Amino acid sequence: GAGVSQSPRYKVAKRGQDVALRCDPISGHVSLFWYQQALGQGPEFLTYFQNEAQLDKSGLPSDRFFAERPEGSVSTLKIQRTQQEDSAVYLCASSSKTASYEQYFGPGTRLTVT
Amino acid sequence: AQSVTQPDIHITVSEGASLELRCNYSYGATPYLFWYVQSPGQGLQLLLKYFSGDTLVQGIKGFEAEFKRSQSSFNLRKPSVHWSDAAEYFCAAVSGNTPLVFGKGTRLSVIA
């Protein structure tokens, strides 16, 4: 596809369950970013990959959050033992090497923890 | 701390009227600046960006923004709003190796 895709688009999890959110970046984009967007707020940075290397994970709110990009393409954001405060839209973005500051966003995954 | 402020939470504009959405940033050095639009259930779409040079930048969908260093501002404008412009608008900034920082957004409503 031409853009960033994310799956699932919607996820409902019971408190305490583990979830995995997938991001397919634009083909050839070396940089990949994850953001968390709470209701009525702007996106907040979670973590950043350049190829398969996770260069910045300073925004991950707790050790329950884990992200990986093992082959430098698809990325997965995993949340263990979900809590109600994890309910948010999780956005993925990618950028190219030549325009690293210009990020292209996917549609997001809306996570609801009940 | 680096921050981006969008003072207006919600703005209502009549269709055909002009629009200005405000954005102020607080950074040690001038960051790169962006405006994104988010329609319900959609991801963020880049409207325009400012890196350097001409302080008036043109974007997609008829939007423009003006960078004013003296005011630490990067306001978004459109001369004539269409009903399809109703959405959430986010200003964002990045500097050096720090992450992209977003404002809290301004929701635009368009009335007939």
Image (cartoon, rainbow, N blue to C red):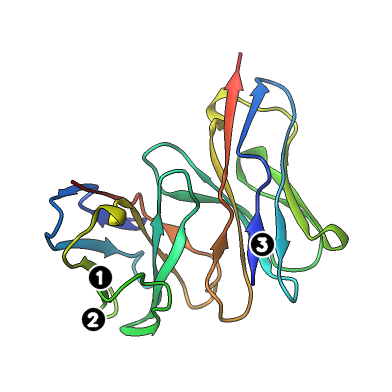
Furthest toward the top, the residue is: B112
Q: What quarter of the picture does the C terminus of chain B occupy?
A: top right
Residue labelled with disc 3:
B33
Up/down of A95 relative to B14, above or below? below
Residue A86 vs residue B4: left or right?
A: left
Residue A49 occupies quadrant = bottom left
Tags 2 and 3 on a common chain: no
**Residue at x-position 21% and y-position 68%:** A78
Tags 1 and 3 on a common chain: no
Callout 2: SS: loop
Q: What quarter of the picture does the N terminus of chain B occupy?
A: bottom right
Checking the image for residue A71, the label placed there is 2
Residue A24 visible in the current orientation: yes
Badge 3 amino acid: Leu
Please identify, in this view, whether the residue under mark 1 or under mark 3 is nearer the observer: 3
Callout 3: SS: strand
